[in-house]
């Protein structure tokens, strides 16, 4: 605040003491312009008023208040100051709207993507979500966990597209998973149920949109129907389903067109590639027999990382993809929380601070029997 006030005082004093042919009054416009850079509307208006008052004082002290030259200077200062104040008011309104949008996005994220608990059953879990749209803070990537009578089931998915347009499909899949994860007897049954839920909703949405502007010409109507069916076929969700029993050293994984999970085992980074990968969810309501659960080892020494393609498709300034498995070798012994912290910082540094697509990461390890609640 001192800078614009000092400028007004200095410019006014020097102008009054200068020879008659020197006029420094127009420089007073600098004061409101500088104030607008760090202050709000009211403070900018106050400094603008002080600047105009200072120019009036200059005119009175130099006996030139009614001259055409001074009147022109005064009118110019009033116009410029008014413009600066108006710009500041518009900027402040936009800032308030942005705060509201972010608060709504945070609330939506809390409802849609409930934070995973740090410990669930026999597992310790950490999760990170990075939205491509900074204002949204939530998009089409998703994750969820649910307890069963014998273990924990995890879901990590990615809706085709990004940002707010994919929230509907993400909320649908999460709701179906939370409702059925503990009811379906097997992982293939759960996958078939989720696929049917997504397929039915996408088909219902396409049918609901048809009557609004259905053309009267039969040929045009047939063409529109084919186009809508094509667009519906382009809507799908890639996902990974995991069943991690409380007992034993095996896990079951069904991969529905998603990047394979990564197992960190004794310094090694192993990708859990499916023998019979399934198509993404929402492409046709497949039967239970179409889904095959692959088994992989998962001991108390291992960490498991499940992620979305926003991680491996992040590019640096040279358009090179993020080398996930190569970078993970440095953190194979890290617990889930620190592992994701290292991975998040390294990923954002690789992408120059901003991702081109939403990214979600979930890290899991088994809880050792001798671990206290505060350990790791």
Image (spheres, grey):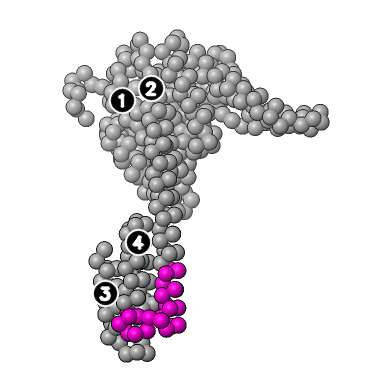
What residue would you read off at disc 1?
A: 117
> What distance separates the C-alpha of mark 1 from that of mark 4?
47 Å
What residue would you read off at disc 4?
A: 44
Q: Is residue 217 visible?
A: yes
- Secondary structure found at label 1: loop
CB contact under 8 Å: marks 4 and 3: no
> What distance separates the C-alpha of mark 2 from that of mark 3?
65 Å
- On-image quarter of the N terminus: bottom left
Q: Residues within 10 Å of mark 1 (few under 14, many from 20)?
A: few
Say which of 343 and 270 sits in front. Answer: 343
> Residue drawn at (45%, 14%), measured in percent from left and top?
180
Q: Residues within 10 Å of mark 4 (few under 14, many from 20)?
A: many
What residue would you read off at disc 3?
A: 9
> Residue drawn at (37%, 90%), measured in percent from left and top?
21
CB contact under 8 Å: marks 2 and 1: yes
Q: Residues within 10 Å of mark 2 (few under 14, many from 20)?
A: many
- Secondary structure found at label 2: strand
| First reached walking from the N terminus: tag 3 or tag 1 | 3
Is residue 149 rendered magenta in the image?
Answer: no
Vertical side of 291 occupied by 111: above or below: below
Say which of 102 and 203 sits in front. Answer: 102
Q: Is residue 362 visible?
A: no
């Amino acid at each position: 605040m001192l800078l614009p006030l000092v400028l007004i005082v200095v410019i006014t004093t020097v102008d009054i003491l200068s020879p008659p042919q020197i006029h420094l009054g127009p420089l007073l416009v600098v004061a409101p312009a500088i104030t607008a850079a760090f202050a709000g509307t009211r403070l900018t208006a106050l400094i603008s008023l002080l600047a105009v008052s200072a120019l009036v004082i200059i005119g009175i002290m130099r006996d030139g208040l009614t001259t055409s030259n001074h009147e022109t200077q005064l009118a110019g200062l009033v116009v410029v100051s008014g413009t600066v104040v108006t710009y500041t008011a518009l900027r402040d309104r936009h800032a308030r709207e942005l705060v509201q949008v972010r608060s709504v996005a945070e609330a939506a994220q809390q409802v849609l993507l409930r934070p995973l608990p740090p410990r669930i059953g026999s597992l310790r879990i950490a999760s990170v979500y990075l939205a491509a749209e900074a204002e949204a803070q939530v998009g089409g990537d998703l994750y969820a966990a649910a307890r069963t009578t014998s273990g924990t089931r995890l879901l990590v998915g990615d809706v085709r597209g990004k940002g707010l347009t994919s929230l509907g499909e993400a909320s649908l899949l999460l709701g179906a998973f939370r409702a059925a994860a503990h009811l379906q007897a097997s992982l293939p049954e759960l996958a078939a149920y989720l696929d049917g839920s997504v397929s039915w909703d996408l088909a219902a949405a396409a049918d609901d949109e048809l009557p609004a502007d259905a053309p009267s010409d039969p040929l045009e109507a047939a063409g529109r129907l084919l186009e809508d069916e094509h667009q519906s076929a382009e809507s799908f969700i890639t996902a990974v389903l995991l069943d991690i029993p409380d007992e034993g050293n095996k896990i079951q994984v069904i991969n529905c067109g998603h990047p394979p999970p990564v197992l960190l085992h004794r310094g090694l980074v192993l990708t859990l590639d499916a023998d019979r990968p399934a198509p993404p969810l929402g492409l046709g309501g497949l039967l239970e027999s179409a889904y095959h659960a692959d088994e992989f080892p998962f001991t108390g020494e291992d960490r498991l990382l499940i992620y979305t393609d926003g991680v491996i498709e992040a590019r640096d300034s040279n358009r090179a993809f993020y080398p996930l498995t190569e970078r993970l070798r440095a953190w194979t012994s890290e617990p889930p929380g620190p592992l994701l912290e290292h991975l998040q910082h390294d990923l954002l540094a690789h992408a120059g601070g901003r991702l081109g697509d939403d990214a979600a990461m979930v890290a899991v390890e088994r809880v050792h029997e001798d671990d206290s609640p505060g350990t790791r």
